[in-house]
Amino acid sequence: MAAASEACSSNLPEQDEVVVYTPLLNGLPKGTDDVQDNQENILKRAKPLTTIVFYFMTIHFLLAFCEIILVAPLTRLFENSLCLSHFDFPVGGIDESLCKIPEIQRPLATIRGWKSMFDTIPVLLVAVPIGRLGDYHGRRKIMALALVGVAGSLCEIFTVCAFPKTFPLQLVWLSSVILFLGGGLNSASAFMWAMASESIPQERRSHAFYYIFSAFYVAELVASFTASVTTDISPWIPCGLAMGSVITCLGLLAVMPEPGRSSDNPHSAIPPETPTGDEISSLNTDMKAPSKSQFVNGVTSALSNRNTLLVIPVFLVGIFRYAMLNILIQYASVRFGLKISTGATFYTETAFINIVLFLFLIPRLTTYIRLTYNIKPEIIDLTLVRTSVVLLALGCLAIGLAQSSASLPIGVSVFAAGFGSRVFALSLVSYWISDDTKATLYAAIVVLESLGHAIGDPAIQQIFAASLGLPPFWQAMPFFVGAGFYWLATLSSSFIRLDQGVEHREEPLLDQND
């Protein structure tokens, strides 16, 4: 689900939506006291950690935990199945070190690559129909259906890996068929974000979403460390934990307060206030699934903006982030002799860096810059997009040029620092499109990225499989190719042009209930 938690952030709102813009002549420079008052007002209005937010944080944690903890053990189980078959099922099993030969690693990369592609097909085919079902029958029920499909898919994979003498490993591809029941983790994650968007008031949504999104990186930290410790003991332990997280998530859906219910519910995230007629009309419009013509018209309208076209390469190359980490585990195992369980610690490093960035550094830094220098938020977002893509390119290149396992963490740390490119790009495009086309454009981005996954994941795996017959230096070919794509995205983002200037704003008075 690397894309699942990433796809979830397509519903992220514009940053600091509480800002109200005033005419230019009213935007006179303010003194230090006014700046401090504004900062205090923003902090007072941001009370994101309500009960319902904690539920969404927990659900997002469980979905991400299921995804991340499976990477290393499934790679080990797949490798073990091929290894046993290659050596004609010796009594007592076979040591992992004997499985690093090209005759095993090539089909392993091929099978993993095609499975990644097959897993994206259900997303492409059922995402819109399932979304419509969620609109009409309740997102919680349809999200539960998607989780049931995930559990069934995992059962099929576990069965094939548990009996390698009976079932050829290629049968794991059939697990993708079961994902048509709900669309898999991608759809479940999308429904979670849709429910969160409905339930959290607009003035608190941006900060609340930062916390919910950060749950992914906390899960990545916990899951990758757990996988690195337990995979050597038995790869079935993390697999069981993944299944347990899916079941726990289903239980949470059954007991959590109804998202978006009336404000007289003490668990509701919505503050006590009566919506106006315009607001009710707006909500009813948002809840209706767009027709096919509306979808096409919305996408056409959004793509008529030059800047939107220039930011598309950022979304396309962003899909390689977790594909690169995924292939890194196998690459480090083949070239440097690292255990697959040790390779899982690269996810731990990535998670730690992104927790620091998203939970602490970036929100505070961007708030400080906007309050101190009155810089427009879209200028900050564009700077973050460009910086992130450059870091992805440099990190990918550093991983490929690493000549020992000791230098790999340096490249991974630089690479991980650029993982926010997609979130910043989503925030950036929200300034260029109208409100009535945002949902359509975000849906189009998810479809576009899913197509990219369907093509990019097996392509990266096939490049690695082909490089196994080359000298050790060229076995890093996937990372060199990835760095080239990231530099192209950097070039594209450099042509984006924004109106320069400072932001003039004044905060609305706080309601006494806040």
Image (cartoon, rainbow, N blue to C red):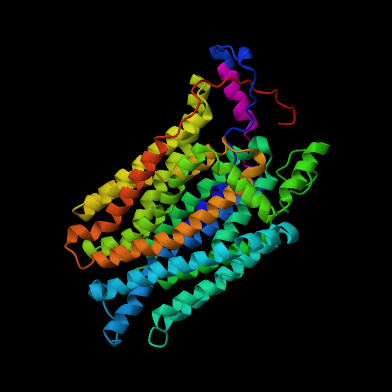
Residue 369 forms part of the magenta stretch: no
Report whether 335 appears left or right of 489: left
Residue name at image x 56 percent, y 54 percent: 60
Against 36, residue 143 (above or below) is below
The quadrant holding residue 279 is top right
In magenta, the rendered stretch is 35-49
Against 394, residue 468 (above or below) is below
Residue name at image x 52 percent, y 49 percent: 215
Against 357, residue 290 (above or below) is below
Q: Position of residue 10 (x, y in %)?
A: 56, 48
Q: Position of residue 51 (x, y in %)?
A: 66, 47
The answer to which of 411 and 272 lies nearer the viewer is 411
Q: Position of residue 364 (x, y in %)?
A: 49, 31
The answer to which of 214 and 373 lies nearer the viewer is 373
Q: Main secondary structure of the magenta part?
A: helix
Split into 4 quadrants, where in the image is the C terminus?
top right
The quadrant holding residue 252 is bottom right
Report whether 220 appears left or right of 371: left
Residue 41 forms part of the magenta stretch: yes
Residue lying at the far left in this picture: please name it. Answer: 471
Residue 163 visible in image: yes
Residue name at image x 69 percent, y 63 percent: 141
